[in-house]
């Protein structure tokens, strides 16, 4: 694990910093993380923002959707991540249905997230129908990142994980989120030309996942990037390693050495 500077020495990335990066034309890098050791590695590698996503339900907990993640669970994982991070902006998903229970309840849930995990921002899915919640959270001092296009918490209503092509709806959602006070917006699984149009139209940064190269930044699920999750990956994923194979091979070697009496050897024993 790389050495990291002590807290307070490295300047933390902030929500306004991401807006400034858009204005300067600098692309934003963002990844998910769900625990201390991987968050430490991600932050040490220089990523700009870390999302503690409700995707943990699928890549950590082995479930089929993101819907089952609870507020207590996301806070538990976010606190581990924040403890590891020295530089990146830490953003935490509002788990279903915390942002659908009224503005006051959403503020209470976001307040718990920020107070108990010490993260700096929250992300919620939605645009037009979430404008009042985004505005309420922003007025309470909570930085909010919005999320339009494919919204995993709406997977049942949307009929599965597929590209969203309703341009008028997506444009309205994105504009409503910006007007309500969101500091950034995730664009998931929308056509690249639409994402490019939104990126030029909005003054807040767009973070793409399956939305083409013209977004202001990109986000991937860390386990997909590292090749840890078994099975086929979505088209928009690029695996930069195949650690799942390496991990399994290492465990197989360990098992064989234990069975053969090779481990532990003299170098791993006390006299």
Image (cartoon, rainbow, N blue to C red):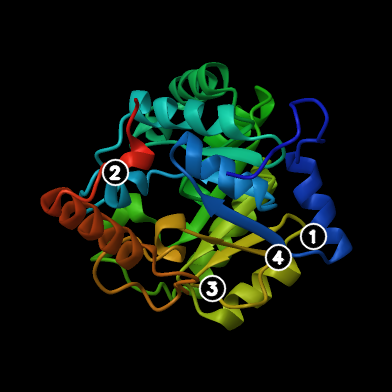
Whichever of labels 2 and 4 marks the residue nearer the N terminus, that label is 4
Which mark is nearer the camera, 2 or 3?
2
**Which residue is identified by label 3?**
211
At label 3, counting other C-alpha atoms closer than 10 Å, the crowd grade (few under 14, some 14-19, many 20 or more) is many
Residue 131 visible in the current orientation: no
Whichever of labels 1 and 2 marks the residue nearer the N terminus, that label is 1
Left or right position of 91 against 68: right
In depth, the one of 35 and 111 nearer the eye is: 35
Vertical side of 246 occupied by 163: above or below: below
Vertical side of 90 occupied by 19: above or below: below
Secondary structure under the numbered disc 2 in the rendered image:
loop
Residue occupying image coordinates x 50% and y 58%: 148
Q: Residue furthest right?
A: 24
Secondary structure under the numbered disc 3 in the rendered image:
loop
**Which residue is identified by label 2?**
265
In depth, the one of 260 and 202 nearer the eye is: 260
Q: CA distance from mark 3 to mark 1?
A: 17 Å
């Amino acid at each position: 694990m790389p050495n990291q500077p002590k807290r307070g020495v490295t300047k933390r990335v902030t929500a306004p910093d991401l807006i400034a990066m858009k204005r300067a034309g600098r692309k934003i890098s963002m990844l998910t993380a769900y625990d201390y050791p991987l968050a430490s590695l991600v932050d040490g590698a220089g990523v700009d923002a870390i999302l503690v996503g409700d995707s943990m339900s699928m890549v950590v907990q082995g479930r089929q959707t993101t819907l089952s993640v609870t507020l207590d669970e996301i806070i538990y994982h976010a606190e581990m991540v924040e403890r590891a991070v020295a530089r990146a902006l830490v953003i935490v998903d509002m788990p279903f249905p915390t942002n659908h229970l009224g503005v006051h309840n959403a503020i209470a849930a976001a307040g718990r997230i920020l107070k108990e995990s010490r993260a700096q921002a929250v992300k919620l899915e939605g645009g037009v129908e979430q404008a009042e919640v985004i505005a309420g959270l922003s007025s309470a001092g909570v930085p909010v990142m919005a999320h339009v296009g494919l919204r995993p918490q709406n997977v049942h209503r949307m009929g599965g994980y597929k590209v969203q092509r309703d341009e008028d709806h997506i444009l309205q959602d994105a504009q409503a989120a910006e007007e309500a006070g969101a500091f950034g917006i995730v664009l998931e699984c929308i056509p690249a030309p639409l994402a490019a149009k939104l990126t030029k139209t909005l003054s807040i940064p767009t973070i793409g996942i399956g939305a083409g190269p013209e977004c202001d930044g990109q986000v991937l699920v860390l386990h997909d990037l590292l090749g840890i999750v078994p099975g086929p990956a979505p088209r928009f994923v690029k695996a930069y390693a195949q650690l799942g194979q390496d991990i399994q091979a290492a465990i197989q070697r360990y098992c064989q050495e234990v069975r053969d009496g090779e481990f532990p050897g003299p170098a791993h024993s006390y006299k």
